[in-house]
Structures are given as C-alpha cells and as structure tokens.
C-alpha cells in the first residue's frame, strides 16, 4: 500500500532522482525544481514523496489556499501543483493515489474542490486527469488548461 512521506534531509537526494519517462519531460518539471518552489513558498506548498515498501515511486506537490486571480482576492484555491511518477513505476495506480491524497488533504482543510493544470498535447496527461474526474473549467493558466474536481 503506498503512503506519503515528507521530504527530509535524509531522502531529498533520492527524491531528486525521481524522473518521468523522457517523452513526458516536456509536461512535467523536475522534482528539484518543485522542491525549490516549495522552499520559496512554504506557506502554500505541500511536497510529499509517494513511497511503496520503502521505495520512492513518485512525488507530488499540493498547493493550498492560494489567491488564484489577484483581481479576485476572494477566489482562493487548492489543488495538485506537481505530479511525477517514476517512469518504472507508472501504470500501477500511484498517480490515482496521489490525486486522491491531495483531494483528501484539501477536504481536511475545508475545501470542496481541487484544481490542477496541465499542458495540452497529444502525449500529455489530459486523459489521465479526465479519467480521474477532473473537468475542464475553460480557464487557462499561462500555457496550461485548468481542471477542477470535487473533494468528496
């Protein structure tokens, strides 16, 4: 059964070695980049390792309670910021586990929806997110589309 583990000084190097398939790299930032962003924004970032039998199989980073649009300061959102499942561990349900973990944490914090973004493209993650129940909002964030999912 997979579980989430905090990133620590003892596992940070192993975390940074998590890498997706080469054809997915254009759709995903390296774990080291995500950890740098988490360090710079600890008030919103929720970085976690996905571990199975003491082996790191992936990385996720949630975001919680951010102002989505500065023009609408009451529009605060939470969701999945990053997801990296190690190439050799894909197709085993770890991505589904990660999304559910972020939904559960958002629900625990009082949010009824979670958001995520992805780069559209024929080899991109869109079908993965849609199969898990995300729905396109019609919004974009930079060059990515926005999806929303309920937390229950």
Image (spheres, rainbow, N blue to C red):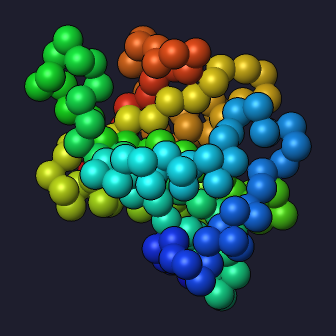
Q: Is residue 2 visible?
A: no
In screen coordinates, is 85 left or right of 25? left
Q: Which residue is drawn at 11% across and 25% down?
A: 74
Q: Is residue 114 visible?
A: yes
Q: Which residue lies furthest to the bottom in this view?
A: 53
Q: Residue at x 66, y 67 (%)?
A: 15
Looking at the picture, does residue 19 appear above or below residue 15?
above
Residue 46 percent across, percent down from the top left: 39, 57
In screen coordinates, is 82 left or right of 124? left
- Quadrant where the N terminus sits is bottom right
State which quadrant residue 55 falls in: bottom right
Q: Which residue lies furthest to the front in this view?
A: 40
Q: Residue at x 59, y 60 (%)?
A: 59
Looking at the picture, does residue 58 appear above or below residue 21?
below
Residue 63 percent across, percent down from the top left: 36, 46
Q: Residue at x 46, y 18 (%)?
A: 141
State which quadrant residue 35 falls in: bottom right
Q: Which residue lies furthest to the left in this view?
A: 74
Residue 137 percent across, percent down from the top left: 39, 18
Pick the front one: 81 or 43: 43
Q: Residue furthest right?
A: 22
Looking at the picture, does residue 97 appear above or below residue 9?
above
In screen coordinates, is 82 left or right of 80? right
Residue 114 percent across, percent down from the top left: 33, 41
State which quadrant residue 115 falls in: top left
């Amino acid at each position: 059964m997979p579980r989430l583990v905090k990133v620590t000084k003892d596992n940070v190097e192993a975390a940074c070695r998590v890498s997706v398939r080469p054809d997915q790299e254009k759709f995903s930032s390296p774990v080291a980049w995500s950890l740098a962003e988490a360090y710079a924004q600890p008030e919103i970032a929720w970085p976690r390792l996905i571990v199975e039998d003491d082996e790191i199989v992936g990385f996720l980073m949630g975001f919680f309670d951010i102002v989505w649009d500065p023009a609408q300061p009451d529009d605060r959102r939470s969701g999945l910021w990053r997801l990296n499942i190690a190439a050799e561990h894909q197709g085993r349900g770890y991505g589904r586990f990660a999304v559910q973990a972020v939904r559960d944490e958002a629900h625990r914090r009082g949010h009824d929806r979670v958001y995520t973004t992805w780069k559209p493209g024929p080899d991109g993650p869109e079908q993965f997110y849609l199969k898990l129940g995300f729905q396109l909002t019609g919004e974009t964030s930079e060059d990515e589309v926005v999806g929303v999912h309920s937390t229950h």
